[in-house]
Amino acid sequence: MTDRRLWSYKDIAAHIRVQPDTVRSYRKHGLLPPPDHVEGGKPYWYSDTIRAWVAARPGNRPRRDR
């Protein structure tokens, strides 16, 4: 089942445990995926988009034993 709820900067920040300004900085520096929706000039992302982004972030990749 696909989760189509839209998340704001605040929602993303809560999910990854940072401040909303940090998420804004990620977007400014091209580290967030493009918004799925813009309303009133404010960007929003589907929760599935953010969960996939979080899973792909370098610090969240599974470690391989050497």
Image (cartoon, helix red, strand yellow):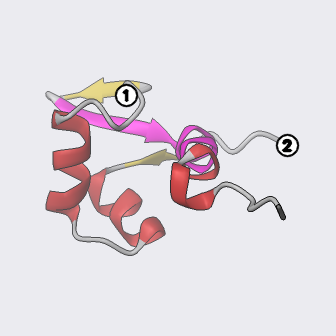
What residue is shown at x 27% (from left), y 30% (from top)?
A: 30
Residue 14 higher or lower than 1, as above or below: below
Tag 1: Cα neighbours inside 10 Å, few (<14), some, or many (≥20)? some
Q: Is residue 64 left or right of residue 28?
A: right
Q: Position of residue 17 (x, y in %)?
A: 39, 75
User: Where are the magenta residues, as a range?
Assistant: 42-53
Q: Which mark is residue 35?
A: 1
Task: Give the Cα separation between the discs numbered 1 and 2.
Answer: 21 Å
- Which residue was labeled with disc 2? 1
- Who is closer to the viewer here, 17 or 4? 17
The structure residue drawn at horizontal position 44% and vertical position 26%, both measured from the top left corner, is 36
Percent position (x, y) of residue 23?
26, 53
Q: Is residue 48 within the magenta segment?
A: yes
Mark seen at residue 4: none
Q: Nearer the viewer, mark 1 or mark 2?
A: 1
**Disc 2 secondary structure class:** loop
Where is residue 61 shown, x and y percent of the image?
67, 54
Instruction: From this view, report whether residue 18 is shown above or below residue 49.
Output: below
Mark 1 lies on a secondary structure that is loop
Amino acid carrying label 1: it is Pro
Front residue of 2/24: it is 24
Three-letter residue code for mark 2 = Met
Residue at image coords 80%, 59%: 64
Quarter of the picture containing the N terminus is top right
